[in-house]
Amino acid sequence: MKIAVIGLGRMGRGIALNLLRKGYEVSGFDIDENSIKKLKGIKNFIPLKSIFYAKDANFILLVLPTGKEVLETINQFDDYKGIIIDMTTLGYDELDEIKKIVSKKKLNYISSKIERGPADAEAGKLILYVGGDESLFNKSIDLLKDMGDFIYVGSDEQANLVKLISTLLLTANTLLLAEISLIHDKIGIDKEILLKALSMGGADSVQLRSRFPMIINNSYKEVFSISLGSYVAEKMIEFMRKEGINYTPLLTDVTEILKFGRILGTGNKDIAEIATLYKKLNH
């Protein structure tokens, strides 16, 4: 089976490597030539000179930074008969525009929004929130299984909203953990004992177990940047305002913190790096 991956950044590259390992013929395109070079020479990987050549694939996976890039890409697809799986996190208005183009061009399009990071992408252990035409979803099941665990939630809009909610919850949790980390050195408890104690009670969370160790050890992995976190938070606020939900104090604070971190260039690896900014501001 032929798969084209458009967007070979952290996540796209991980997905491509996973599918190559599982025997797929994978082609890929990215506007950054360095991203393509990282996959050159790998058996069964075909670097594409332009998006046009992706049309030979059975499936096209869109793993792009924002909806802007998805719109630019979708506009270049004419007469494509395969299935487009959009794995990009989008804003409400962006998805609406994309769906209009999909309808006009009569493209086969579904959403599959990603949870977890690049290492999980490469290991085939992603969590996928899938939405869109159910018959297209059924045709995509084998490919989705090879990328991770998935749940079909309904429409494209619902899949995208579940992703926004999930990302916002993990982001808010991480920002609070970063604040709490400031008192770690003050209380004199061993790092491992502190982590174990917190994970035994009501404070336990995925972020406590995955990101709190990064924070207290000041050792960050490339997972989910503050720039992307800021984008998601802003898109969630846009959606809620559109639905008439205007009083969102915590979401507003989270959005402002992420925006501040992004402007200062903090968190290129992961949102947990906001802890480094907190430390600077408290000294």
Image (spheres, rainbow, N blue to C red):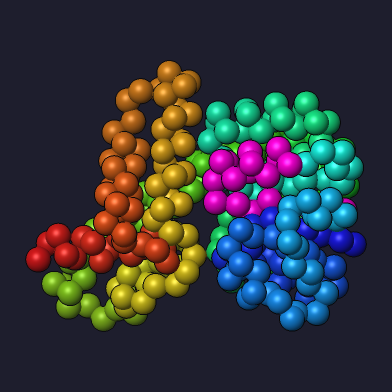
Q: Is residue 149 visible?
A: no
Residue 277, image x, y percentages: 23, 61
Q: Quadrant of residue 26?
A: bottom right
Left or right position of 215 against 73: left
Q: Nearer the viewer, residue 93 or 144?
A: 93
Any magenta on residue 260? no
Q: Quadrant of residue 147?
A: bottom right
Residue at x 71% of width, y 37% of height: 75
What residue sits 66% from the left and 33% below the top?
Answer: 98
Would residue 26 be found to the left or right of residue 197 on screen?
right
In-image side of 205 versus 2 (left or right):
left
The mark total stands at 0
**Residue name at image x 62 percent, y 33 percent:** 95
Q: Quadrant of the C terminus?
A: bottom left
Q: Position of residue 218 (x, y in %)?
A: 31, 75
Is 69 a magenta residue?
A: yes
Q: Is residue 132 above or below residue 243?
A: below
Give 173 or 96, whichever is nearer the viewer: 96
Query: Does 149 sit left or right of 78 as displayed?
Result: left
Residue 99 percent location from the top left of the image? 69, 30
Q: What is the magenta range?
A: 58-76
In the image, residue 35 above or below residue 130: below
Q: Residue reaching furthest front?
A: 49
Q: Is residue 247 visible?
A: yes
Can you say which quadrant of the picture contains the N terminus?
A: bottom right
**Looking at this rendering, what residue extends furthest in the top direction?**
244
Quarter of the image where one finds residue 74: top right
On screen, 105 above or below 64? above
- The residue lying furthest to the left in this view is 283
The x, y position of residue 117, in whole percent, is 55, 64
Residue at x 32%, y 70% (from the top left corner): 215
